[in-house]
Amino acid sequence: MEILLVPHPILRQKAKKLNSVTAEDIKTANLMMKSMIKAPGVGLAANQVGILKQIVTINFEDKENNKKSNYILFNPKIIKYSQETVVMEEGCLSLPEQYADVERPKDIVLEYIDENNKTIKKQIDGYEARILQHEIDHLSGKLFVDYLSSLKRNMLIKKVKKIQNIKK
Ligand SMILES: [Zn+2]
C-alpha cells in the first residue's frame, strides 16, 4: 500500500463507519499494518492509504513500561478526554520528516470494535493515548498540523511538497 502525503485531498475527507467488520476489512487492516511497520510508523489510519473506512492500526513499543502493543481498531471513538493536557512532539507518515509540539488531553477512554466484532472499551494514557488521538483525527480528515498556527502549518506542508519534488 502506498502512503499518501499532504496535500492529497483524501487526507481531508471523513472515513465511513463500518456496519460490521468483514473479512475484507480485516484483510485491508492487515495490509495497512504491514505498510505501517515497513514505513516505519507507530500508527496508521485508512485515509492515509486512500481508503475512507474507519480503520486504524497501532504498533508501538513503550520501553519505559516494557509494553508492546500491536492491534487493529475498527470504528474507534474517543468517549472521554481528561481535563489535564500534555505537550508532545508529533510526526506523521503523511508529512515525512516534519515534527511539531502539539497539546492534547493526557488520557482518553476509547471504544472500538475488534476483528471479532467485539466492542472494546478501555482507558488509555501516555504515549498510546497520544498516538490514538492523532490516528482518530485522521478518520475525520484532521491532521496534527491543524493544531499549529496557519503560518507553521503551511510551512510544514510546503516542506513536504519540496521533499516530494526532490524525490521525483
Ligand atoms: Zn498521521
Image (cartoon, rainbow, N blue to C red):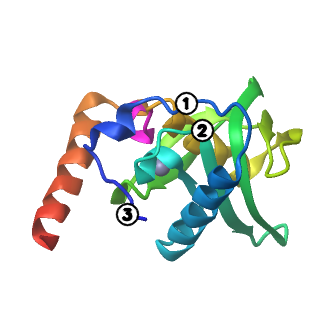
Main SS of the magenta part reads: helix
Mark 1 in CB contact with mark 2 (< 8 angstroms): yes
Upstream in the sequence, badge 1 or badge 2?
Answer: 1
**Which residue corresponds to the image point at 42% horizontal and 58% vertical from the top-left?**
93
* Residue 54 badge: 2
Estimate the spatial distance between the alpha carbons at disc 1 and disc 3, rounded to whole Å.
20 Å
CA–CA distance in space, label 1 to label 2: 6 Å
Task: Give the image location of residue 64, x and y in percent.
Answer: 79, 69
Under mark 3, the amino acid is Glu
Q: Position of residue 52 (x, y in %)?
A: 48, 38
Front residue of 31/159: it is 31
Mark drawn on residue 2: 3
Q: Is residue 126 visible?
A: yes
Q: Earlier in the sequence, mark 1 or mark 3?
A: 3
Is the CB of the residue bearing disc 3 within 8 angstroms of ligand 1? no
Q: Residue type at mark 2?
A: Gln
Residue drawn where x is 43% and y is 54% of the image = 49
Name the amino acid, label 1: Lys
Q: Against 57, is 117 above or below?
A: above
Rendered image quadrant of residue 95: bottom left
Query: In this rendering, is residue 5 above or below 121?
Result: below
Q: CA distance from mark 2 to mark 3?
A: 18 Å
**Element class at badge 3:** loop
Q: Which mark is residue 16?
A: 1
Q: Nearer the viewer, residue 64 or 30?
A: 30
Residues shaded magenta: 142-146
Q: Identify whether 126 is placed above or below 81.
A: below
Report the residue that reaches farthest toward the bottom: 38
Q: Residue at x 72, y 29 (%)?
A: 78
Q: How many marks?
A: 3
- Give residue 166's quadrant in the image: bottom left
